[in-house]
Amino acid sequence: MRRRGSERSRVGTVALVAGGAVGLALAVPAAASSAAASSAASDPAAAGTVTYQAKLRPLNHQTGSGWLRLRLRGATATITEHYSGLAGKLNGKPYPHLQHIHGGARGMCPGMSADKNGDGVVSTVEGQPSYGPIQTTLSVRGGVTPQAGTDLTIAPKGPSVHYRRTITLSPAAVASLRKGIAVVVVRGDDPKTLSRKAQKEKSELVPSLPLAVTSPALCGVLKAMPVGGAGAGAGTTAVTDHATGAWLFGTGAGLAGAGALARVLLVRRRDRAAYRPA
């Protein structure tokens, strides 16, 4: 009888330990998920890096094309861009192609139906209902604010560009990226491709410049690139990844604990059979 009581006590102790292990394992996923979400909410950088890409297509009868990739971490953006086929000269000098990230509107590139005055050109102002105001200037040096948006001295120049720069985006530009409504617009039409009426018009942004200089030549919507087969979001992907990792860890621990508990029950059943009174 003393031996049977001792075995029961041992089995009960092991079962209690195994049960505690199972409870701890089940608690791990929820705790880890909560910690990951809390970390991402308090620190935007904790959400990880999200990559956006835009295919640059021609507007206003231009023939250029290109692409732009933007890697965003917090408000820091590393931008890599290539385009070619745009106008190369303006008044005998390399053509300055102003470029910007727009947002806060419909998140799209305008069609020719946006040409309201019938001059055959969608001007910057006519395109704004589609892509919104300037939120960050993509200059080769110096300022990147909207106020730097018409500074020809810091714009990329020539018919083709290989552009790379790390800058701090405005809060408005970051918000537009996260919402999927950020649009890249590269300006500078070849005057020879425009109607006679448009060739005589002045820019709405800088009246001392021809309309062609500030009118869109290329346009592309920035979309998050998928990571691991899932759509990349503004931080949500990173949070989900952390939570998923914790869940998998917790499940493994839970399975191990459940296996231990099953072994304890098997021992208990065997002991009962061995010490059953005659």
Image (cartoon, grey):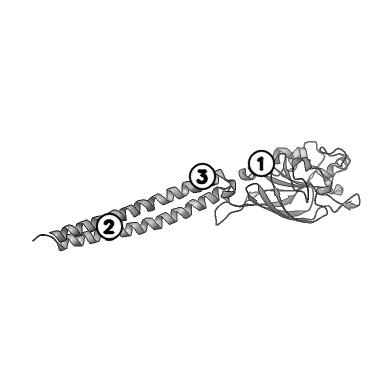
Q: Nearer the viewer, residue 199 or 254?
A: 254
In whole angstroms, how far apart are the C-alphas of marks 2 and 3? 36 Å
Is the residue marked by circle 1 packed among few (<14), some (14-19), or many (20+) residues within 10 Å?
few
Q: Which residue shows up at 52% across the image and 49% down it?
A: 239
Residue of label 1: 171
Q: Which residue shows up at 22% across the image and 59% down it?
A: 268
Q: Is residue 122 above or below residue 94?
A: above
In whole angstroms, how far apart are the C-alphas of marks 2 and 1? 56 Å
Residue 14 numbered tag = 2
Amino acid of disc 1:
Pro
Q: Nearer the viewer, residue 221 or 93?
A: 93
- Disc 3 is placed on an element classified as helix
- Disc 2 is placed on an element classified as helix
Number of numbered discs visible in the structure rendering: 3
Q: Is residue 122 visible?
A: no
Residue of label 3: 38
